[in-house]
Structures are given as structure tokens and as C-alpha cells.
Image (cartoon, helix red, strand yellow):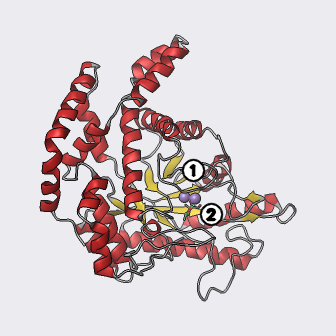
């Protein structure tokens, strides 16, 4: 299924007058306060977030999985789904593949399909957290950190294969996330596990093309419950530094212990030029992988405040690989992703409204109240007309969720693909 331009313009007609009124009102107010509204709108329009190939089907928990029907069962169908998201929102112009869940069979055809939908291939993700069919070695006790050289070599080779696959598609980054760790005290020697991981990553790094990045993702626990080898940003940064200039830390919002100050982590990594990528989601307890902005929208805004500051003040830090990393257990995955994309844009827009000059001045005056007023003033602004304008300018819809529903997208997908389809992924 492909959404046609006429469907979009027909849909937009109904809400255009209302949008214009809201936009003019906000735009006048913001311009009066010294903001450059068209600059903000074009920044929003430029901001693209990758959709992970594994998030287009219903996720599940260890207690069960409930299908949402009409899920994509091939990579081609997954890319079609990203195409639907992108044509509505104009902010999902990339896909991130997980290998071996989504290995292309015909590279030229898949590239052509993605090109036609204006979708790029973002970071490719390796998978050494599950045993693969016909694999000689098992990852039950770890992969890159394993005490067995044969297991480490198999895991290294897998990562090198993933780079080759990504290279054929135009990807420029490899994301490595390891489930390696231990579930019981004494099970692992921490130093041996860390050193093995460093050595294995260096071997992978040697196979990285010059214009590629290696993104090292950290996570404190799960699936191991006592220790994780790459448990936090410090471990990730040490490993990245041990590899070289093309290796960076990747922050996944769900991969922190409760109440961690993620905005501070993000800020300091940018100062050091070492923040490479970002996985968006939200959580109440752990790596819940819920819709972005559904639980802690203010924390997301504070993170974006630091990201905006970094994008403007830290040229030593590269452009980031942005990706949504969520799981959709009870919602239609496409609706959930639309809500996440909207929440990301909203937090970004609000962060762009922070008066950085005034904030700096208030900080120098130690005017704590003013600092808070500046942040919260931006946060309390209803920026949705700016998001609508950015989408409209690029040919998207005023309200992606309403359009998705009124165009009956899920029903069309079920009709086209059948009801009981299953997507590969978590
Ligand atoms: C691990 C993780 C990592 C994986 C993805 C499926 O929790 O965040 O990024 O690749 O989930
Ligand atoms: Mn992740
Ligand atoms: Mn995760």
C-alpha cells in the first residue's frame, strides 16, 4: 500500500484553515519574542529519525504476543510500512536493519524501493544475543566477551558480515549491542570479559570502512541480571576510545537505572565529541520500550535541550544517528511509531524555543529561578502548529494519526497481506 499525494492534499484541505489560524497566532507570538520561526520550522523539517525494521510488527513479552494483523512479513513490506510513516509524517526518512532478522535477498531491488520512497539506510545492527540457525557456536554464555576464542571469532565475523551487508545498502554505521554479562556473582571474571570485549571490538573496528562509525550501545541489565559487560556510558566510552576515532557511544533512553540523569550524560559525551547515536523510547521501570514521550516528556525535553546545545556548540561531535527503539505490544505499531515521531518533534521544537542567550546570562547571575522560568516557559508552549507547518511544507499531513485512521491504512494492509502475518523481530 502506498499513500498517494492526492489523498494527502484532500485530507489536509479539511484542517487547513484551522491550522493557518493556529500557526499565525503562535508565529506572531514567537516572532514578537525574538524567535526566528521559519528557521525553527526548517530545522524540524530536516530532522529525520530512523525506524527500526524490527518495530513494524507487534512486539511481545515473555508472557505472550498479540498480533496486530496485517504485519509486514518481508523486508519489502517493512520498507513499505516505513514509506507509509514517512509520507504521512515526513520525519521517518530512514530505516535501521537488524541482521539477521532482515537480510535483503535482492540488494538492487530493495535500494530502488527505498529510494523511491525517499528512505535511507541508517545504522545496521548486529545480533549476537541469539543463536543463529546452523551456527557452530552458541552465545548462551556471551559473544564478544566469551571465554571461548571460537565463540568470539564467530561473533566478530558476524559483525564483519553485517558491515558488508550495510555497505551494499549505503549504511554508514554499525551498532553493536551485547547481551553479554552474567546472571550470578562469580559466574564471570569482570576484567577478562571486558578485555575480551575490547579485543573483539578492535577486530571489528579494523574491518570498518573509513567513512563508517561504530556505535557501542550500553545497557545495565537484561537479559543478564547480575552484570552486563557494557553496563553504562563509562564502559561504552572506554571501549570506543580503545577502538579509535570512528567509534562512539550510543545512548538508548531505556538503558539506564531509574532516575539517571540522561541529559547530563548526553551533554558530556558531546563535549568530548563521543556521542554517536541515540535510541528513543520511554519507560517507567526499565527497558520498557514504550512510546516516546508517553511517561516522562519533561525528561525528553531536557535531553533535547542538551542535544540542541551540543548541535550548536560542539562541532567536535558528529551528526547523530537517531532511531526509535520501541516495542509495540498492545497498540498498532504504525500508530505507536507515529506517536513517537510526534513526541520527538515536539520535544525538539520546545528545546529550539529555549532562549540560550538569556539562559546563559541567568546562569552567570546565578539566577536559579530565572533559569527554571526560561526552560519551563519553552516547555509550556504548545508547539504543535510548528510541527504541522514543517510537515505541510514537505508534503506530509497535518495530523498523522488522524490521517492514518481516516485513510483506513491498517484495514488496507490487512486486505493486501492477510490477517495472520508475523513480522520478524523481538
Ligand atoms: C537492546 C536493544 C538494542 C537491540 C534492540 C533490539 O535492549 O535496545 O538496541 O538491538 O534492543
Ligand atoms: Mn536500543
Ligand atoms: Mn533496549
| Res 104 → quadrant | bottom left
**Label disc, if present, on residue 328 of the rendered structure:** none
Observer able to see residue 27:
yes
Q: Relative to 182, does residue 358 appear above or below in the rendering?
A: above
On screen, residue 163 versus residue 383, left or right, reads right
Residue pointed to by mark 1: 283
**Badge 2: how crowded within 10 Å, few (<14), some, or many (20+)?**
many
Picture residue at 66% right of the left edge, 86% below the top = 136
Which image quadrant: the C terminus? bottom right
Circle 1 sits in a helix, a strand or a loop, which is it?
loop
Compare residues 415 and 142 and report the one nearer the observer: 415
**84 vs 269: above or below:** below
Q: Position of residue 336 (x, y in %)?
A: 41, 58
User: Camera-side residue: 256 or 286?
Assistant: 286
Q: Nearer the viewer, mark 1 or mark 2?
A: 1
Q: Is residue 298 above or below residue 365?
A: below
Q: Which residue is mark 2?
A: 201
Q: How many marks?
A: 2
Amino acid at each position: 500500500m502506498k499513500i498517494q499525494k492526492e489523498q494527502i492534499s484532500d485530507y489536509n484541505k479539511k484542517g487547513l484553515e484551522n491550522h493557518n489560524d493556529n500557526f499565525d497566532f503562535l508565529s506572531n507570538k514567537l516572532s514578537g519574542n525574538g524567535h526566528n520561526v521559519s528557521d525553527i520550522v526548517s530545522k524540524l523539517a530536516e530532522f529525520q529519525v530512523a525506524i527500526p525494521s524490527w518495530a513494524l510488527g507487534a512486539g511481545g513479552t515473555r508472557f505472550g504476543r498479540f498480533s496486530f494483523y496485517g504485519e509486514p512479513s518481508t523486508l519489502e513490506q517493512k520498507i513499505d510500512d516505513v514509506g507509509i510513516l514517512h509520507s504521512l509524517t515526513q520525519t521517518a526518512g530512514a530505516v535501521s536493519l537488524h541482521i539477521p532478522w532482515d537480510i535483503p535477498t535482492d540488494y538492487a531491488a530493495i535500494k530502488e524501493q527505498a529510494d523511491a520512497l525517499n528512505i535511507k539506510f541508517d545504522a545496521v545492527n548486529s545480533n549476537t544475543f541469539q543463536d543463529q540457525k546452523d551456527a557452530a557456536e552458541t552465545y548462551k554464555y556471551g559473544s564478544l566477551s566469551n571465554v571461548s576464542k571460537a565463540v568470539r571469532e564467530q561473533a566478530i565475523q558476524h559483525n564483519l558480515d553485517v558491515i558488508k551487508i550495510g555497505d551494499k545498502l549505503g549504511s554508514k554505521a554499525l551498532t553493536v549491542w551485547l547481551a553479554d554479562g552474567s546472571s550470578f556473582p562469580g559466574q564471570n571474571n569482570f576484567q577478562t570479559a571486558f578485555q575480551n570485549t575490547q579485543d573483539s571490538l578492535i577486530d571489528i573496528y579494523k574491518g570498518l570502512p573509513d567513512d563508517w562509525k561504530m556505535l557501542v550501545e550500553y545497557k545495565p541489565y537484561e537479559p543478564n541480571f547480575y552484570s552486563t559487560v557494557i553496563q553504562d556510558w563509562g564502559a561504552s566510552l572506554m571501549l570506543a576510545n580503545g577502538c579509535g576515532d570512528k567509534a562512539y557511544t550510543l545512548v538508548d533512553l531505556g538503558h539506564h537505572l531509574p532516575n539517571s540523569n540522561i541529559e547530563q550524560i548526553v551533554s558530556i559525551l558531546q563535549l568530548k565529541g563521543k556521542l554517536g547515536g541515540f535510541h528513543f523510547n520511554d519507560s517507567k521501570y526499565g527497558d520498557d520500550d514504550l512510546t516516546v514521550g508517553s511517561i516522562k516528556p519533561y525528561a525528553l525535553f531536557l535531553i533535547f535541550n542538551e542535544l540542541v546545545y551540543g548541535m550548536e556548540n560542539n562541532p567536535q561531535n558528529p551528526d547523530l544517528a537517531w532511531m526509535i527503539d520501541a516495542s509495540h505490544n498492545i497498540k498498532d505499531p504504525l500508530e505507536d511509531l507515529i506517536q513517537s515521531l510526534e513526541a520527538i518533534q515536539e520535544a525538539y521544537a520546545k528545546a529550539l524555543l529555549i532562549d540560550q542567550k538569556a539562559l546563559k546570562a541567568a546562569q552567570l547571575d546565578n539566577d536559579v529561578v530565572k533559569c527554571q522560568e526560561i526552560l519551563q516557559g519553552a516547555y509550556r508552549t504548545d508547539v504543535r502548529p510548528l510541527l504541522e507547518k514543517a510537515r505541510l511544507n514537505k508534503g506530509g499531513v497535518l495530523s498523522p494519526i488522524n490521517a492514518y485512521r481516516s485513510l483506513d491504512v491498517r484495514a488496507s494492509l490487512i486486505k493486501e497481506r492477510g490477517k495472520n502475518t508475523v513480522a520478524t523481530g523481538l
